[in-house]
Image (cartoon, rainbow, N blue to C red):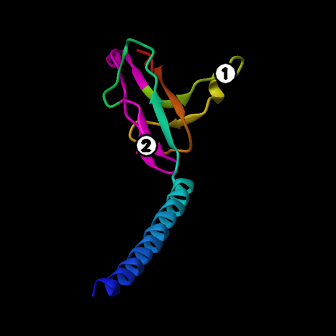
Amino acid sequence: MRAAFLPLLGAFLCLFFVIACDFVIGYVELGGERDDERRRLYTVTFVILDEFIICQNCDPIRGEEGDVITLPTPRHINAADGWVFDGWFRETADGEDEDNAYRYGGGGDKHTITGDAEMLPQFSRIVLNP
């Protein structure tokens, strides 16, 4: 009885080893494919440089390419004096015309993440003639 058991045990262990190796190799291969498909995370940063600007919900947002976010709406503490929010803009490079700066959108607008971005709020003052 003992002599018949040893070949069965050997066959079982051999089969277990083959299945285990196949599982491990398959798992490693799947892991490699999964890493290739993983999308990169980007950061959208809202840069507030002026102490007269208050912005809730302006923490950096991390997301994958193609994610859609809602842009926050900052406010100027002197809004009663005619300061209005024009939108979120890309910082202009030296010598670049500020009137042609890239506008990401206004408060509450949707923005699709395409890469890292630093957005600066722009305000203008509306002066009413008396």
- Magenta region: which residues? 58-84
Q: Are marks 2 and 1 in contact (CB under 8 Å)?
A: no
* Disc 1: which residue: 93
Quadrant assignment, res 91: top right
Q: Which mark is residue 109?
A: 2
Instruction: Give how far across and how far down residue 73 sits, in percent.
Output: 37, 32
The quadrant of the rendering that contains the C terminus is top left
- Mark 1 is surrounded, within 10 Å at the Cα level, by few (under 14), some (14 to 19) or many (20 or more) other residues, namely few
Instruction: Give how far across and how far down residue 53 sits, in percent.
Output: 38, 18
Is residue 59 magenta-colored?
A: yes
Residue at x 50% of width, y 29% of height: 119
Q: Is residue 15 left or right of residue 56?
A: right
Q: Nearer the viewer, residue 17 or 1?
A: 1
Instruction: Give how far across and how far down residue 123 sits, in percent.
Output: 46, 22
Residue at x 43% of width, y 13% of height: 50
Quadrant assignment, res 55: top left
Residue 15 visible in image = yes
Residue 86 visible in image = no
Residue farthest to the top, as pictured: 51
Amino acid type at circle 1 is: Ala
* SS of the residue under disc 2: loop
The tag earlier along the polypeptide, 2 or 1, is: 1
Residue farthest to the left, as pictured: 1
Residue at x 60% of width, y 33% of height: 102
Up/down of 88 relative to 54, above or below? below
Instruction: Give how far across and how far down residue 75 sits, in percent.
Output: 35, 24
Residue at x 62% of width, y 29% of height: 101
